[in-house]
Amino acid sequence: MKTTSNASLKPYNTFGIDARAKVLCEVHSIGDLREALALAGSETQMMILGGGSNILFTSDYDGMVILNRIDGISVVDEDEIHVYVRAGGGEPWHGLVRWCVERNYGGMENMSLIPGCVGAGPIQNIGAYGRELKDIFFELDAVHIETGKVRTFSLADCSFGYRESIFKKKYRDQYVIAMVTFRLDKDPVVDTKYGSISDELAKRGIEKPTIRDVSDVVIAIRQSKLPETDVLGNAGSFFKNPEIPADEFEAIRKKYPEARGFPGNGGKIKLYAGWLIEQCGWKGKRVGNTGAHKDQALVLVNYGGATGQEILDLAGRIRESVKKQFGVEMEMEVNLV
Ligand code: EPU
């Protein structure tokens, strides 16, 4: 376990915000993690950081930041249909996806190139191109922050929803996800329903895609419109896609016939936040060192040297203009610290 005082968090958050932590502690095993949690008891506050890809530091952190670097990927069980793959919470997500794709274990390929670490995946039930983590989740082991006890959570225990889980609600800030087990298909069935995947496969003349083809195509699509975090600081989608009542959607459609929506929860309609932001004129717009990306307006970027507060101010202005123009409230997807 490595501990550093007054550490810069810049290398550990994909927005590239230069905030500082009073203490930074890197853990490589469940044993390390428990030790760090015990030490953290004497600090005023404590937080866990994985890939730092869904976080915005708006000030320095006056407490202990624990970097989850618990690694390892292995097959722990199998039956005729499935293989069970267990991965450390500190493993980079995309590395795990490619590990599975190379072995022809199906189910993760649509979620290629999502930034971040495995342990953060279940917290917001990450998803992309028609698939979500919950579709391949089997169970996870988490350490209870107060007692250090390890608890296993099944699929039902996690209460997954759209970018939601029990770890964002009832158990918020109570557990650290140490290991996650996924249930994957030995005889994969590809899911290419998402428009841009089928278009790109057709363009490449691939009629019977393998999971490797799907993974490659998803990587290409993401690279074509999502800025790489080592080039331009960002945290992927900044807001969630908002859900609104059907009658409000119809009212928007009257004014904007091209508005697209799809079924959300409880009869509501989900709108594309990227479209709303673009309609308000923010796409590609720069404000100081911040801006909304030119190819995907839902992604807010740090052009270099921006503070977290500047990004937050931009987000506030975007939110206000969407509210004013469409009457729609957007919720943040990124976590604020
Ligand atoms: N759109 C615009 N203008 C924009 C951006 C998007 O009009 O500037 C419209 C277009 O019509 C486009 C549609 O929005 O076809 C959907 O865009 P996209 O396929 O990029 O998906 P998204 O709904 O904006 C969601 C996830 C992404 C995930 C993609 C692909 C959320 C909040 N975001 O974005 O996840 O990669 O689908 O499945 O659900 C993330 O969570 O950080 C993330 C990147």
Image (spheres, grey):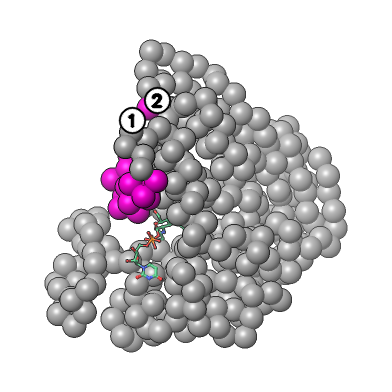
| Residue 61 among magenta residues | no
Q: Badge 2: how crowded within 10 Å, few (<14), some, or many (20+)? A: many
Percent of width and height locating residue 108 = 45, 37
Residue found 56% across the figure and 58% down from its top? 54
Residue 276 is at least partly visible in this image:
yes
- Residue at 63%, 49% (x, y): give it: 50
Please state if 140 lies on the left or on the right of 117 as rendered: left
Give percent across and percent down for residue 214.
42, 40
Q: Is residue 111 among the parts visible in the rendering?
A: no
Residue placed most toward the observer, 302 or 194: 194
User: Of tags 1 and 2, which is closer to the observer?
Assistant: 1
> For residue 206, which quarter of the picture?
top left
Residue 213 falls in image quadrant: top left
Q: Is residue 216 left or right of residue 179?
A: left
In space, the residues marked 1 and 2 are separated at their CA atoms by: 8 Å
Q: For the point 57% across and 31% down, which residue is it?
A: 99
Contact? badges 1 and 2 (CB < 8 Å): yes
Q: Compared with residue 238, is residue 194 higher up or lower down, i.e. above or below?
A: above
Image position of 224 with respect to 190: above or below: below
User: Which disc is residue 189 wearing?
Assistant: 1
Q: Residue furthest front?
A: 205
Q: Residue at x 77, y 49 (%)?
A: 25
Disc 2 marks which residue?
185
Q: Position of residue 322 (x, y in %)?
A: 36, 80
Amino acid bearing label 2: Asp
Q: Nearer the viewer, residue 135 or 45?
A: 135
Quadrant where the N terminus lies? top right
Which part of the image, by quadrant, shows the C terminus? bottom right
Q: Splitting the image into four quadrants, where does ligand 1 fall?
A: bottom left
The amino acid on which the numbered mark 1 sits, given as a three-letter code, is Val
Magenta stretch, residue numbers? 188-204
